[in-house]
Each structure stands twice: as structure tokens, then as C-alpha cells.
Amino acid sequence: MGLYKIVKYLAIALGVIGAVLALMIMAGDADTADSMGSNVLYVTYIVLGLAILLVLIYVVKGLFAGNIKKTLMTVGAFVAIVVISFVISSGTDLDLTPFTKKGQDITEATSKNVGAGLYTFYILAVLAIGSMMFSGVKKILNR
């Protein structure tokens, strides 16, 4: 049995389990919903773990089946974007006093990590939009 069939049957089984748990929560009272909430979270964690595992399996399978040089260049470009984003984020552009007064553990390092994540998102979004525009213009000009 191929990996695709296993994944398909696994997805169907998890969908049925999720539907049964959702119906049990909707049909029950508030106490049932409170007690079932943790079970739904466990199912969510399991599904997330399986999805990550399957993605990793397909990535490794694709690495050995395809052009590894091109894949490593893409991963290197992504790592370079993350490093550049981390370097340009300062972490000092936010007044942390209101957060510490509320008892939240927000430091400059946390602010720097959040800033790096935002810069990474912005750079990747601009690159994605730019590549879509470039391919569209290229198609129009080649006709």
C-alpha cells in the first residue's frame, strides 16, 4: 500500500474522530463541553504532529528524488532572509513598561524575536508578490 493511501485513510479516520468529538460537544451541556475541550486539544496536537511528520517525510523523499542543489539553495536563501531580518530588528523600539506592569514577561529579546519574525514575513511577502507580478508581466510580454 502506497504512502498516499495510508495518508488518505489516516485523514479520513482523523476527520471522523474530530466530527464525533465535535458532535459530542455540541450535543452535550456546558460540563460536557468543558471536559471534552481538553480531548479536542489532544486530537489537535496529534493531527498537527502527524501533519508535520508527513511534511518532513515528503520533503526528505523529494530531496533524494529531485535536484538537491536547487533545494539547498532555496533553504539557504530562506535562512539568509531570517538572519537578515534578525540583524535589522532592534528590539528597543517598544516601551516595555506597560507589559511589565501587567506581569507579562516581555523582554527586549522577545521584542527582537517578534520584530525579526515580522521582517521575515514582510520580506517573503514582497518577494512572493514580486515574483507573481514578474511572471504575469513576462507572460503578457511573451504573447
Image (cartoon, helix red, strand yellow):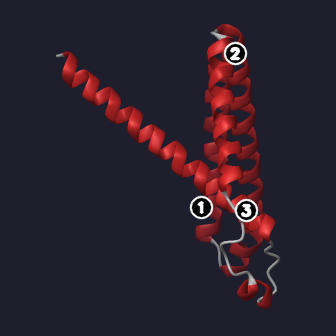
Residue at x-position 70% and y-position 36% = 79
Report if residue 2 is visible in the image: no
Q: Sequence order check: which comes first, mark 3 or mark 2?
A: 2
Question: x%, y% of residue 17?
Answer: 67, 48
- The answer to whether 139 appears left or right of 45 in the picture is left
> Which quarter of the figure is the N terminus placed in?
top right
x 73%, y 81%: residue = 96
The residue at the point 63 percent across, 40 percent down is 81
Q: Counting other residues with Cα less than 10 Å from the Cα at mark 2, is it few (<14), some (14-19), or many (20 or more)? A: some
| Residue marked by disc 3 | 112
Residue that badge 1 annotates: 23
- x%, y% of residue 130? 39, 38
Residue type, label 3: Lys
Q: Please report whichever mark, 1 or 3, sits nearer to the chain's N-terminal start.
A: 1
Q: Quadrant of residue 25?
A: bottom right
106 shown above or below 23: below
* Front disc: 2 or 1: 2
The answer for how far apart the CA atoms under marks 2 and 1 are is: 41 Å
Q: In the depicted view, which residue is nearer to us: 2 or 17?
A: 2
In percent of width and height, residue 68 lies at 68, 12
- Which of discs 1 and 3 lies nearer the camera? The answer is 3
Marks 3 and 2: which is nearer the front? 3
Q: Outermost residue, bottom direction? A: 101
Query: Mark 2 = which residue?
Result: 63
Residue at image location 47% in from the left, 39% down from the top: 127
